[in-house]
Image (cartoon, grey):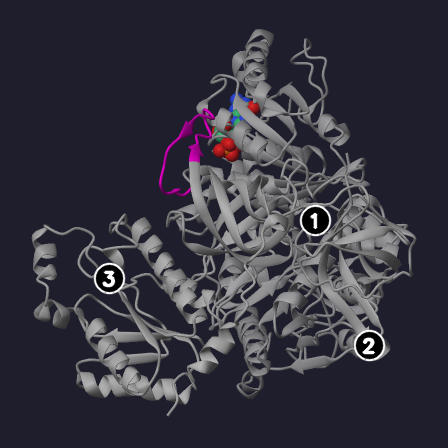
Amino acid sequence: MANLPDNLKRLEAESIAILRETAASFGKPVLLYSIGKDSGVLLHLARKAFHPSPVPFPLLHVDTGWKFRDMIAFRDETVRRLELELLVHTNQDGVDRGIDPIRSGSAVHTRVMKTEALRQALDRYGFDAAIGGARRDEEKSRAKERVFSIRNAAHAWDPRDQRPELWRLWNTRIQPGESVRAFPLSNWTELDVWRYVAAESIPVVPLYFAAERPVVRRSGTLIMVDDGRLPMNPGEVPEMRRVRFRTLGCYPLSGAIESDATTVEDIIAEMRASRTSERQGRLIDGDEPASMERKKREGYF
Amino acid sequence: MEMGTGQSLLRFLTCGSVDDGKSTLIGRLLHDAGLVPDDQMEQVRRDSRGRTDQEGEIDFSLLVDGLEAEREQGITIDVAHRYFATARRSFIVADAPGHEQYTRNMATAASGASLAVLLVDARKGLLTQTRRHAIVASLMGIRHVVLAVNKMDLVDGAETVFTAIREKFTTFAGPLKFLSMTAVPLSARRGDNVVHRSAAMPWYQGPALLEHLETVAVEDGSAEGGTENAPLRFQVEWINRPEPDFRGLSGTVLSGRLETGGAVTVWPSGRSARIARIVTFDGDVERARAGDAVTVTLEEAVDAGRGDLLSGPDGGPEVADQFAAHLLWMTEEPLIPGRSYLLRAGARWVPATVTTLRHTMNVETLEHGAATVLEMNAVGLCNLSTAAPIAFDAYEANRHTGSFILVDRFSNRTVGAGMILHPLRRAANLHRQELAVSTKERAAVKQQRPAVLWFTGLSGAGKSTIANRVERRLHTLGHHTMMLDGDNVRLGLNRDLGFTDADRVENIRRVGEVAKLMTEAGLIVLCAFIAPFRAEREAVRALLPDGAFLEIFVDTPLEECMRRDPKGLYAKARDGALRNFTGVDSPYEEPDAPELRLKTAEADVDALAERVVEALQLRGIAGT
Ligand SMILES: Nc1nc2c(ncn2[C@@H]2O[C@H](COP(=O)(O)OP(=O)(O)O)[C@@H](O)[C@H]2O)c(=O)[nH]1
């Protein structure tokens, strides 16, 4: 804590207060662990917030079945190393219906395998607070997100009835059946996250670092061929390129960037010189305008 | 300039009226600070076509999401947050959309900010809105302002225009207690004096806006609460108990410093202790300062819980159950003095009422006005009373320990935001009369458990008839009862009250208190009141121990009540001879989950009364 620059220290303290608030105010919270850098920071903050007690809630990973293999390996290793309780949920109904990101399209896949799956998991375990790693700087429409966002019993978000948040006096009161989404990283930027990862030596999935990987180029985006499930177009042959990922999700939906950054310091340097936004690599947003807003209403993060 | 990794953090808000150029200014700041990614800039360049005077000119307002569209869809937005960093500082910008809700939105944005940028259009000069922005900023505790005089290009960069505006503002803002006030002439559109000092206004010798924001000294952590030099306030947020012999208090140092071995007092209990350890994930530390999140353990086994405050030898907080505060009302349903709300101060929730609305404050002129209710976006000076004493400071001394929100007990909406001025009466002087004979003993002698049976329903639904029958039955069984109904109360205790919403609320509050006293005497109290609002019925429930309040909904359809009309009141109400009549021109909020629902259409009075008596016997209130 002593070596952190002042602004990171403030962000850290604020996030810790939000995590404690969630633990103290709700009966059954859960941390949504999506394996990426933001989840990594969130988990690290949760360990700090409750130390010397263990993290007082389980982790939940909504697995679409299409995550990079490296992500799953990293997840399992992290859980083992830190002795955490991890719940993994997959929408079996979606699997049975044959939903996949390639043939069903990213919009349907995301709705069924992420949004619906998350709702199923929250209902199944009866969680009343789901802690997520979303940041307001990720996207223009997130700039207005609350730290504690209320969902009704059907997990819907009513954009017309949002509570103002003043000072740190969060209004955590809910009716039976309602739940909240809590976002402790609301005020962090992508750069803050990386600087914090560096300062605190937080492990991240190796896919964030540049390495030779098999990729194919599709409509201007580099897609990694992570396993044999990605069908090749006629004449398409994977080529080895030195790439890394800025955001991680389902591998057929995550765009890689060409890069030489092999350390967190390299990534920070690259970002500071870089001229593209984080979400460019996230194919799910490209589907249609205002798609984030709609997804939020349906219960996606 | 490239994206920076600033070391300190400044939270500021921007305020301006529609079209003053706020979006353009924020977009310009982000762009000139080198924070706009190429792909996004390309999009904006494309979208700018046809929107600007000159071919190729960029409309920087497109870089920030216009809040207009959401507002038109009815989406509630109070604040949009944006982030950028330079080599010197990181910034969090809170931007509140204007329009009707402006005071509420701006207050929300200002609650987390240390500095305000007030935008004015050089052509228009100071407007009423500018005054409102300055007054709300001051009320919310902002001590540093920047007057950004925008669109200087449209007045040919004239120094006289700028100087006149600056001077007028300085005079006006005199009483507002700002510690620093800086005026900058700029053109958001052309980028003059935004990030770079401009040659267009050679007469201006001061800093460009960004330069000022990077260097202005705001008290350390003022948006978070108090400064490091202020008295210690540590807020307990979570009790940390990994094992039986470790009892940690996890929380945030809101102001001052915490030191191992240091003497502390726990509030509101007032017990003293010494800090044994300051525990963090990275190991124990000797001291922590304002802004730090840590866990402390105490030498002594002193009771402390979530919501408590620790102070040091340099002075403790006020502890009181009555205080005066400025209250900003944030919801459409107006504040009604006497109604019970939930108050959150620090990490503590407690039931509270506004006992008196002393006056309202006009946020454009600072003038005082008289009012009986506080409407949305209005600010009032109020006296509040909490169900238990709380520890606090004056908002002026500590924004973190001096603020509170009020929440509607039923809808859970955040309805008010308060800034505490001073205590009205110290709880220390308050000694509740110790009752020599306890409530339990009184009830035991009567062989019953005291309770309030609250019969609610429309006028003519049959409340009094059924309640009377129940009381007769209970009396026969040897129970001690008392009946309160609208008529016997309104003729005496409440004869000063009418039928406005505010009076109805007060009527039920008094009845609730009287009923409570009677339960303390060991009685089973039957109340037959319309009590049309859920919030009041819930408030009475909250006065009583768990299980001692039974809501009995006498469910008779309105048409049936109108047909019966035993007192001829519905007829009068329909003719307009009687105003504010429940069910006709005043609302009735049905109970969601009453303990009993009596459908009068389906059974006769005796059968219904018997159901009530059975329910009491089942609950052990009445004997069998
Ligand atoms: N000439 C001139 N026009 C400006 C300046 N700043 C903003 N504008 C224009 O004023 C109008 C309103 O600006 P906008 O940023 O949307 O205002 P907002 O409603 O306060 O966010 C737009 O047409 C802008 O191009 C300026 O410095 N000079």
User: Residue B510 at x, y = what percent?
Assistant: 36, 57
Which SS class for mark 3? helix
Q: Is mark 1 within 8 Å of ligand 1?
A: no
Quarter placement of the C terminus of chain B: bottom left
Residue beneath disc 2: B244
Which quarter of the picture shows residue B605? bottom left
Magenta span: chief secondary structure: loop
Which quarter of the picture shows residue B472? bottom left
User: Residue B219 at x, y = what percent?
Assistant: 75, 34
In the rendered structure, which amino acid carries the disc numbered 2? Pro
**Which stretch is magenta?**
B359-378
In the rendered structure, which amino acid carries the disc numbered 1? Thr
Quarter placement of the N terminus of chain B: top right
User: Residue B338 at x, y = what percent?
Assistant: 40, 51
In depth, the one of B595 and B444 nearer the eye is B444
The residue lying at 39 percent from left, 74 percent from top is B523
To which chain does the residue with label 1 belong?
A
| Whether marks 2 and 3 lie on the same chain | yes
In depth, the one of B573 and A120 nearer the eye is B573
Could you tell me if residue B54 is visible in this image? Answer: no
Residue beneath disc 1: A276
Residue beneath disc 3: B488
| Whether marks 3 and 1 lie on the same chain | no
Mark closer to the chain start, 2 or 3: 2
Relative side of A215 to B540, left or right: right
